[in-house]
Image (tube, grey):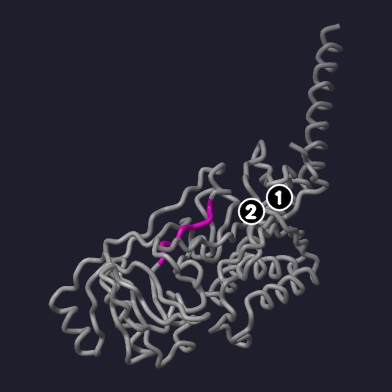
C-alpha cells in the first residue's frame, strides 16, 4: 500500500455532496486544512432538479455541487475524486488514516463522513430505469412536478396508506396498489374512501411505458391501470462501510414496526461514539433533504472546529508550561546535588 501523505490535514471529509461541501466550506473559512474525498456518485443524480433549497430552487443537482466545490476550494479546501474504502485510528490517538481505492492514504486529526445512502428499490421490472423521473418516493421533492396527474402508490409496508394520503395533497387521482403489503384496516379503508383514493388488489409485475413516458402499472392478472407517476418506498441503506474499521456500524431504523433502512447514530451536531469522528447528511438522517443535509454539514463543521480549537489550546498550554517544568526540574536537581556536596564537606 502506497502512502501519498505529505501532511496531516485538520479534517478529511469523506463524501462530496451537500453535507460534505457545506462542512468543507465552514472549516476552510475557519482556516482549517480540509481534504474532501468525493466518489462522484450523488444519490440525487437521476433527478433533473433539486427543490426546497431556498435561493436555489429548481437548480440541477450537478450544478449545485459544482457551485459548492468552487466555493469551498476558494477558501483553500482540497477536493479529490475517488472512493475512500477504509479508515483506521493512528497509534496513540494521533488521528486517523483514510485509504482510497487506489491504495493511496491520507491522515487527519478529525474525520467527517457524509457518504449518504443507497435507495434499494423493490425488484419490480422498470422501476430502477425510471427512478427519480416518474418513479418517485418524496412528495416534497417531486409532488409539484406531478400535480394533478394520475399517481399510483405501490404498497410495500404498513406505511403505504400514509403515503397514499400524503400524495393526495398533490393529486385527486391517487390509486393504492396493495401488492405485497398488509391489507388496510377498517379505519384506514374509511380514510382512503373519504379522500377518494382507489385501492387495487394484486401483485404489481411491471410498468407500461410509451415512448419515454410512463403510462400505466401492470398487474399479475394482466390488468393495466393507467398512471403517469408511481410512488415506491425504497429501503434507505447508509453508505457506511468506510466506518467499519473504526467499529462504527449502522443501526436499523424502524417506523411503525417496519424497518425502513439503516443509519449511523450520532448526537445533534453529528459526533459519533468514536471520539474524533463525525457524520452528517443522509448517512445519519435518512429523511434529510438537500437543504437539511447542507445545514447538518455546516453544524458538524462548526462542532469539529470547536473540538480542534480545544485541542489546540491544550497543546499550547502544555508547550508553554514545558520550559518552566524543565527549569524547575533543573533547579531541583541542582539543589539536591548541592545538599549532597554540603554533606560530604561536613563529614570531612
Identify which residue is drawn at 75% across, 62% down. 79
Residue density around tag 1, few if under 14, some if 14–19, many if 20 or more, within 10 Å: many
State the residue position of label 2: 111
Task: Kindly indicate whether the residue at mark 2 contacts the one at mark 1 (C-beta within 8 angstroms).
Answer: yes
Identify which residue is drawn at 63% across, 41% down. 89
- Say if 122 sits above or below 207 in the image: above
* Residue 235 highlighted magenta (yes or no): yes
- Say if 288 sits above or below 284 in the image: below
Foreground pick, 260 / 231: 231
Quick check: can you spot residue 216?
A: yes
Pick the quarter of the image with the C terminus. Answer: top right
Identify which residue is drawn at 24% across, 84% down. 198
Quick check: can you spot residue 313?
A: no
State the residue position of label 1: 108
Return the x and y of residue 190 as percentages of the image width and height.
Answer: 16, 84
Q: Would you say 2 lies left or right of 200 here? A: right
Task: Work out how far the residue at label 1 is from the one at label 2, CA to CA, in angstroms.
Answer: 7 Å
Q: Which residues fall within the magenta stretch?
A: 234-240
Q: Would you say 280 lies left or right of 216 here? A: right
Amino acid at each position: 500500500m502506497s502512502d501519498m501523505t505529505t501532511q496531516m490535514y485538520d479534517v478529511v471529509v469523506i463524501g462530496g455532496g451537500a453535507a460534505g461541501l457545506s462542512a468543507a466550506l465552514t472549516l476552510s473559512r475557519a482556516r482549517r486544512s480540509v481534504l474532501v474525498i468525493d466518489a462522484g456518485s450523488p444519490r440525487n443524480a437521476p433527478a433533473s432538479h433539486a427543490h426546497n433549497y431556498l435561493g436555489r430552487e429548481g437548480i440541477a443537482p450537478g450544478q449545485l455541487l459544482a457551485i459548492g466545490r468552487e466555493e469551498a476550494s476558494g477558501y483553500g479546501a482540497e477536493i479529490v475524486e475517488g472512493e475512500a474504502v477504509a479508515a483506521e485510528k493512528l497509534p496513540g490517538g494521533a488521528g486517523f488514516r483514510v485509504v482510497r481505492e487506489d491504495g493511496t492514504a491520507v491522515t487527519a486529526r478529525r474525520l467527517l463522513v457524509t457518504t449518504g445512502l443507497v435507495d434499494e428499490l423493490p425488484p419490480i421490472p422498470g422501476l430502477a430505469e425510471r427512478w427519480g423521473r416518474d418513479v418517485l418516493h418524496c412528495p416534497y421533492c417531486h409532488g409539484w412536478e406531478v400535480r394533478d396527474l394520475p399517481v399510483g402508490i405501490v404498497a410495500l409496508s404498513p406505511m403505504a396508506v400514509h403515503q397514499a394520503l400524503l400524495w393526495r395533497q398533490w393529486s385527486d387521482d391517487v390509486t393504492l396498489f396493495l401488492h405485497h403489503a398488509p391489507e388496510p384496516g377498517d379505519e384506514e379503508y374509511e380514510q382512503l374512501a373519504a379522500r377518494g383514493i382507489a385501492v387495487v388488489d394484486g401483485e404489481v409485475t411491471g410498468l407500461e411505458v410509451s415512448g419515454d413516458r410512463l403510462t400505466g402499472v401492470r398487474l399479475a392478472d394482466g390488468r393495466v391501470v393507467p398512471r403517469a407517476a408511481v410512488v415506491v418506498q425504497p429501503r434507505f441503506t447508509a453508505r457506511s462501510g468506510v466506518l467499519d474499521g473504526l467499529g462504527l456500524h449502522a443501526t436499523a431504523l424502524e417506523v411503525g414496526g417496519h424497518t425502513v433502512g439503516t443509519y449511523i447514530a450520532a448526537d445533534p451536531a453529528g459526533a459519533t461514539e468514536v471520539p474524533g469522528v463525525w457524520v452528517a447528511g443522509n448517512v445519519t438522517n435518512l429523511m434529510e433533504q438537500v437543504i437539511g443535509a447542507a445545514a447538518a454539514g455546516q453544524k458538524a463543521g462548526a462542532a469539529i472546529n470547536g473540538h480542534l480549537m480545544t485541542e489546540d489550546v491544550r497543546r499550547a498550554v502544555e508547550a508553554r508550561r514545558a520550559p518552566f517544568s524543565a527549569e524547575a526540574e533543573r533547579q531541583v536537581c541542582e539543589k539536591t546535588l548541592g545538599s549532597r556536596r554540603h554533606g560530604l564537606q561536613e563529614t570531612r
